[in-house]
Amino acid sequence: MRSEARGRLAVISALGVVEILAWGSSFYLPAVLAGPIAADTGWPLGWVVGGLSIGLMVAAIASPRVGLAIHQHGGRPVLALAALLLAAGHVVIGLAPNLPVFLSGWLFIGLGMGCGLYDPAFATLGRLYGAEARPAITTLTLWGGFASTVCWPLSALLVEQVGWRGACLAYAGLHLAVTLPLVLGLIPPAPAAAPGAEGTHRNEGPLAPRERRAFLLMAGVLVLGGTVMTLVSVHLITLLQARGVALAAAVSFGALIGPAQVGARIVEMATKGRHHPLWTLTVAMVLVAAGLAVLAAGVPAVGVALVLYGAGNGIYSIARGTVPLALFGPGRYATLVGRLARPGLAAQALAPSLGALALAYGGADAAYVLLLALALANVALVGALWNAR
């Protein structure tokens, strides 16, 4: 038992480092590099940042096939491919002589994101551990919560020392020298059949009508959740400044989200899975809605609002991996996670433009109302999901 526990710890730790580098070099990359890239090249900032939207849309298109590949072959080859794709994308971006080549690099990064972010990692754990994957998924999100904490300062240091092009090439090297060996060395091949998948016909057959309703509701939760998360990530500083918060204070308030996410995940880990994952999802959506309600109301409690939001968003990352496992069983988990990821990633790709339109035509108040409406709608979807489980 102890050797098995050590083996799981090694797998989760390896995946944790993989997720930090995957998220930090893709989703969180433009936050630090977009400004230096635009200043150095003269390319429009909107197009530079838009590379991430292109990448997310490519990831959305690829996700169902990725889930099917993990179901059939396990996560090890898919995660190894992610490392190679992310490295290739960073090489293209780092050497890009013009904007079209730069954006083409995001096609590779998008495929790498589709093969290497949370959903493929969750599917990998589900394929390895079956019905017992929930604690592993929860622990992995704790690692992933440090992606921006690690990679934002790292990106800034690299830009200062070797420029933005050198930073991209350095990330390519990290994926080849760190991510790829971790995957090949510590992630075991998947078993012939998903463990714990007793009742093969029940777990691997097509969705029954009631299950299909639950699947569609869960997809809706991921769409709204991804939209809210991306809107806040991209536009939070602008929204806070519109309420009279100084830039330095807005940045300080925004920094509360990360620790709140990690803290909430630690609390979730401490419960040791004694409750149904839908409770985690319910609490997550209520906390997110409560935090955004405080912000939308203009109450002078910005710090409290962002701690509530951060805590909710932190355990939402856990629930998006554990709820499908509980609802649909381990036998088809990887395939369904891949299918569920597509609409959420597509929503994340479109969310920055949606927020920009709300700010341009309705101002900050319209953007706050939009965020709160999406969050409340998600609470309602989770309520419907309880009835459909």
Image (cartoon, rainbow, N blue to C red):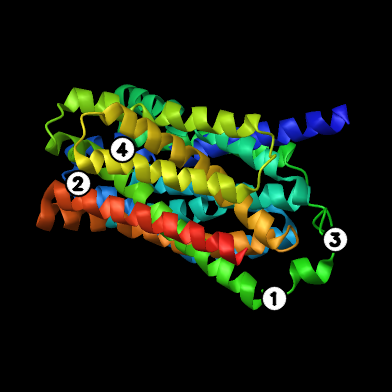
Label number found at residue 206: 1
**CB atoms of marks 4 and 2 within 8 Å:** no
Q: Which residue is mark 3?
A: 198
Q: Which residue is mark 2?
A: 45
Q: Quadrant of the C terminus?
A: bottom right
Camera-nearest label, 4 or 3: 3
Residue drawn at x 74%, y 57% is 330
Q: Which residue is mark 4?
A: 31
Q: Which numbered disc flags the more N-terminal residue, 4 or 2?
A: 4
- Residue 386 seen in this snapshot: yes
Q: Is residue 21 left or right of residue 366?
A: right
Camera-nearest label, 4 or 2: 4
Q: Which numbered disc flags the more N-terminal residue, 2 or 1?
A: 2
Camera-nearest label, 2 or 1: 1
Disc 4 residue type?
A: Ala
Q: Is residue 66 above or below residue 248?
A: below
Q: Nearer the viewer, residue 25 or 345?
A: 345
Q: Which numbered disc flags the more N-terminal residue, 1 or 4?
A: 4
Callout 3 secondary element? loop
Camera-nearest label, 1 or 4: 1
x and y percentages locating residue 324 in the rendered image: 62, 57
Disc 3 residue type?
A: Glu
x and y percentages locating residue 239 in the rendered image: 19, 40
